[in-house]
Each structure stands twice: as structure tokens, then as C-alpha cells.
Amino acid sequence: MQFLRRILLALFVRPVAKLLIGMHAEGLEHLPNTGPAIIAANHNSHIDTLVLLCLFPTKTLDILRPVAAADHFLANPLSSWFSRNIVGIIPLKRKPVFGEDILAEAKEALDEGQILIVFPEGTRGDPEEMAPFKAGIARLADHCPNAPIIPVYIHGAGRALPKGEMFVPMNVSAYVGEPVFWHENRSLFMDELKSAILTLKAQAPPMHWD
Amino acid sequence: MEDTGYFEVALVGAPNPLSIGIAVVFIALIIGTLAAFILPRIQKGKWSDLGPRMYSWWVIVGIIVAALYLGKMPFIVLFGLISFLALKEYLSLAPTRKEDRPIILLAYSAIVVAYWAIAIDEYPFFLTLVPVYLFLGLALAMAWIGRTEGYLATVGIIYWGVVVCVTNVGYVALLMQVPPMELPLQSPTGLVFFLLVITEVNDVAQYIWGKSFGKNKITPNVSPNKTWEGAIGGFVTTFLIIWFLGPVFTPLKGLPLALLGVLLPIAGFGGDITMSAIKRDLGVKDTSNALPGHGGILDRIDSLTFTAPIYFHFLAYFALEKF
């Protein structure tokens, strides 16, 4: 299955993404090639996950795991098969049974040395706007304090494919920054991560869209 | 003559001017590449963008020459793709409103319509369907969506992009439909080749003259690196090339050729500073990063969007019976 995933990404997703959304990327040298690590990006579109997968060399794909909402992506068998096997998601139950650790599978993946893709906003939200961060990213960082958290700002994805609308070809760019590390003060850590992503946003071209 | 026949003609009876022309372009690329290795070592910092610039030139020239050799339809498809990439760059930067996303899809449909008209060789369709009727359709569709705030500005913004990136770039592909018997080389490939070469030589000559002798700024607010010395040096260089090589590649001669020699370099300059004005307005330096050392596709073809229609209409009015 990993083989199919590699083939699809290298021969189909990457060229199509290059054609339709340009896929400009800066700061790729900050991306880790081994885990454990967490990629933390702003989230406005389903394209975001594909953009992040395309940033990595094909061989790193095997250890890349996007953390994604179970209720959305496992909604039907086809979507479930595709999300699990091709995108390689770790499904996240947004409404847990009491006492259950919804991040257990994600933590396990970090322990195994995988690279998680996490959207700290938790949901796609309004196009091209950043919502407040949820606490999940801090809990993952706390669980694996030596894992670097790499901030990524994705520009334009919310304009190309906003929530609940059709896709329109538009250039999308990704800006990767220097890693941030966990420290005990949770709110300070969250602020640090958020400001790292906002600093990257300043590199993106201005967007005239209202 | 069939679609694929052009180069059979071009290759028979050596030495063909087109083959010589292509060889000269590759020699220029080799010289430029050598310069990209040597100049940055002599004058530190002044030529740092030349390396990536030359690398992109090799890719651009390689793709264009390959498409020219493959014949009419592959060339038309290539320019359809270039129009798409250019329009996508433009629409990604230009101000539009959240409600306009379906309108942007409609704007992309201009590429299909225009290149379809070119492919089936229907010149009147090419002249009217996008510049007149899609123009009306865009305005109507936007009125239908119903947001009036910013309506007029957005209609204008989208239409400008469509004409520049689709219709004007489309003229290059339309040249492939010129009947071979009306041309000195018996093939429109030479016609296209000559347009692309003089447009790019004009850009490069202005750049080189400007870098070497530039002092007095010509457009201080729009494009501060451009100088009178660069512009005039470039214009004269391009005029001489058009005057001496025009009769080899095109059916133009005498006064019309001289007029083209004067107007085309000015048009190329015009396309360049127009795109600069747009970029300044939008607050970006380059239209994208698709071509290292050049910027975006639009940064590379800005001059061509002005020179292609002028070149085509000069030929159509003064020399071609078909158009």
C-alpha cells in the first residue's frame, strides 16, 4: 500500500498540483526527514493536506501521517479507504467517549518516530483566516517534548478550495519556518507557535480578496 | 500540406534559415551560460541572477523548439497551457471578491474557447468570442450573482487578464494557421520563431544595454531599473535585426517592415512596463516563482502580450491574403 501511495503521489498528485496550484514552496530546508516531528500549519482547505504531503521527498512519505477528523473522512467506505491508505491519515474522533484519549493513536505514531501533520485550528474555518488554536497540539508536544514542531503557513488554499465550495485553479504557496519546541508553559508555547506561523505569513504575497 | 509537414519542408534543402536561426539561439544560450559562470566572478554581486536566469532560458527554449518541431497542434496546445499558467498567475494576484469564484472559472473557459477557435482555424471566432462575447458574458454573470459593491472594478480586472493572457498570447498560436505558400520559408514555423526571437532579443538587448551604459531613468515610478540608454540601445538593436532578417522570415519588406521595426520594440517595452505597473499596484515584485531568475510566466511573456497582436496585424494588413 505504501508503494501505491508513493506512486500516486509522485506520478499523479505532484504533477497535477504543480499544474493547477503552482505549489511554490520556501524554507524546505527546515522540513525534518526523520521523526518524531510535528508539522503545524494553518488550515483553510482540503488542499492543505495534499500541499504538505507534496512538500516532502517521496521516500519520507512512508512516515508522514496527517491527523484528520474521523467523522468527516471516515464517513463512507470509499473516503475511508482513500483517507487511511493513500493520504495515510490518523483518524481523530472529535466527540470522544468519556475517559478515552482521542490522541492515543497520534501519540503512538510519534513514539514510533513518525512525522505528524497537525492543523492546530482543528477545522478549516473561514477562508484565508486563522482561527484560535485548539489544545491538541500542546498535548502532543507535551507527550513527545523532544519532537520539533515545524510551523508552515499555507497561502491561497482557502481561495482555491474553500470549505463547501468548488475548486478553482489558483496559485498556492507554502512557507516553512524554523522549528519550535515544547516548553512547560502551555499558553506561552501556543502563542509562540501561532506567532511563528504569522511571521511566515508576512513572506506571502498580499491577497486582495474580500 | 498536412499539420506535421512543416518541418519536413524546413529540414529539406539545407542550410535552411530557420535551422540556422535555431542554431544561433542555442549558441547565444551557450554564450549566456558561460557569461553566467564568468561574470559573477569578475564583478561580484552585479550578475548574481544570471545563473538561474540562464537555466530557465534553457528550459523555455527547449520546450518551445520541441513544440515547433512537433508541428501545429502541439504548438497550439503548448500556448494554451502558457495562457492558462499566465491567467492563473494573474487571477491569483488580482483583487477579486469572494462571490467571484464562479466568474473566475468562466474566465478560464476563455482559454478553451480561444484555442479551439485557433485549432479549427476560425479567425472570426477568435476575434469575437472572447474579446466581445465572453466580455459580455462575464459582466452579465457577475450582475446575476448580485454583489454590486466593487462590481465595475472587478469586471474590468478580470477582463484585462483574459485579453492579455488569452487573446494576446493566442495570436502567437494563430500564426501557425498562416498558409505556408504565403511565406518565404514555406512554413509558419519561421514566422513564429522570428516573433519570439525579436521579442526576447528586444528584452535582453534592453537589459544588456541598460546594465552596461544605463544612467538616466526612463520610468522612475513604474520600473526604476529601466533607463533611456537601455531602451534606445534595445530599440536600435531590435530594429536592425528586424530590418535585416525580416525579409528572410516574414513576407514583409520596405516601409511596412521599417514601421514594424520601429513599433515592435516600443510595444515590447510597453508590455514590460505595463506589467511592472500592475505589479507595483498589487504590491508584488514578481508574478510568481515559476521561472527561477525571471519570476513568473507573466514576467517572461509581458512583452509578448503586446508584440504578438501588433506583429500579427502587421502581417495580416500588409502581406497575408488569408487574414
Image (cartoon, coloured by chain):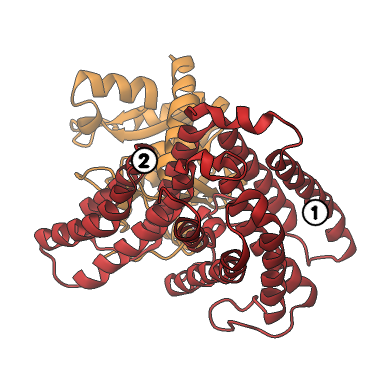
Q: Amino acid at mark 1?
A: Ala
Q: Residue at x 52, y 39 (%)?
A: B180
Q: Residue at x 35, y 49 (%)?
A: A157
Element carrying mark 2: loop
Q: Residue at x 44, y 16 (%)?
A: A4
| Label 1 crowd (10 A; few <14 / some 14-19 / many >=20) | many
Is B63 above or below relative to B161?
Answer: above
Report which quarter residue B228 is drawn in: bottom right
Q: Residue A177 appears at what percent x and percent y?
A: 54, 52
Chain identifier matching the red colour in the rendered picture: B
Chain identifier matching the orange colour in the rendered picture: A
- Whichever of callouts 1 and 2 sits on the residue coming sooner in the sequence is 1
User: Which chain does tag 1 point to?
Assistant: B
**Residue B36 circle label:** 1
Q: In this figure, which residue is indicated by the disc labeled 2?
A: B121
Q: Amino acid at mark 2?
A: Asp
Q: Residue at x 31, y 53 (%)?
A: A159
Left or right? Give the position of B30 relative to B260.
right
Q: Residue A160 appears at what percent x and percent y?
A: 32, 48
